[in-house]
Image (cartoon, rainbow, N blue to C red):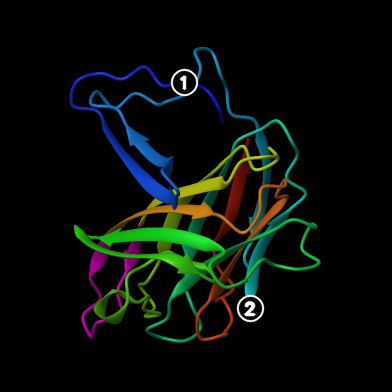
Amino acid sequence: GAANITTAANDRAEFVSLGSGNWICVDYTTADGTAVVAAGSDWEFVSDTAATAAAALSVTGLATGYDYILSVYNIKPNTDADNLLGHVTEDNGATWEADAAAYGWSAVNNGAPESNYSDTQIRFNRSAAYTFGNDASSVNSYDILLVNPGGTGLYKTISATGTMMGSAATPEKLDVVVAAVYIGGTVAINGFRLTWGSGGNFVAQGGVIINR
């Protein structure tokens, strides 16, 4: 949200330029590993929804006044060597924002970065050798943080950490860190959707746990 962060030596932050000298913090990690949240705050369980053999894994009905964590677990694509994409909605899923330059994102797989600060989507992996596999042993899990999605007047930040299984002949476990910002508007967003770049379906396993 708009809370101040008390910094300490060796803390790390990532900022994205919004142009005209304006910057937004999309990720902050403290040196001692403590969370950047207000003292005494708690997460409230909202729901646990199973993934089905459908083209999208969607969450709508996000309320104002909360940050959200979407814990996506054990998902995989029906098509091998796929990319995982994210979009937000301002109208509870009637439309999903995909305008040119609606998003900026940076993804790091096993220390190797890739970024696009003017995209139609958020990508949760790098390209080429860092696509998602769908072997029987492949499982992919992410914690996706939506910061104050119901707020107005501000761009929305989305960050994620997770583990994915690559699409190489011998699948490799890859650590992933993603920092993103929705810059397509400053009104409230009330949903988030994951899809595969191929347009294919999810395998009917895993799901998403929502906390706020």
**Which region shows up in magenta?**
163-174
Q: Quadrant of the C terminus?
A: top right
Determine if the magenta segment contains residue 164. yes
Picture quarter containing residue 129? Answer: bottom left
Mark 1: amino acid: Asn
- Per the model, the C-alpha gap separating discs 1 and 2 is 39 Å
The residue located at (62%, 71%) in the rendering is 99
Frontmost residue, 49 versus 17: 17
Percent x, y of residue 52: 65, 71
User: Is residue 60 in view from this perspective?
Assistant: yes
What label does residue 74 carry, if any? Answer: none
The residue to which callout 2 is attached is 55
The residue to which callout 1 is attached is 4
Mark 2: amino acid: Ala
Q: Is residue 18 above or below residue 79?
A: above
Frontmost residue, 202 versus 93: 93
Q: Quadrant of the N terminus?
A: top right
The residue located at (65%, 35%) in the rendering is 45
Frontmost residue, 92 versus 2: 2
Determine if the magenta segment contains residue 161. no
Q: Residue furthest front?
A: 20
The residue located at (46%, 67%) in the rendering is 118
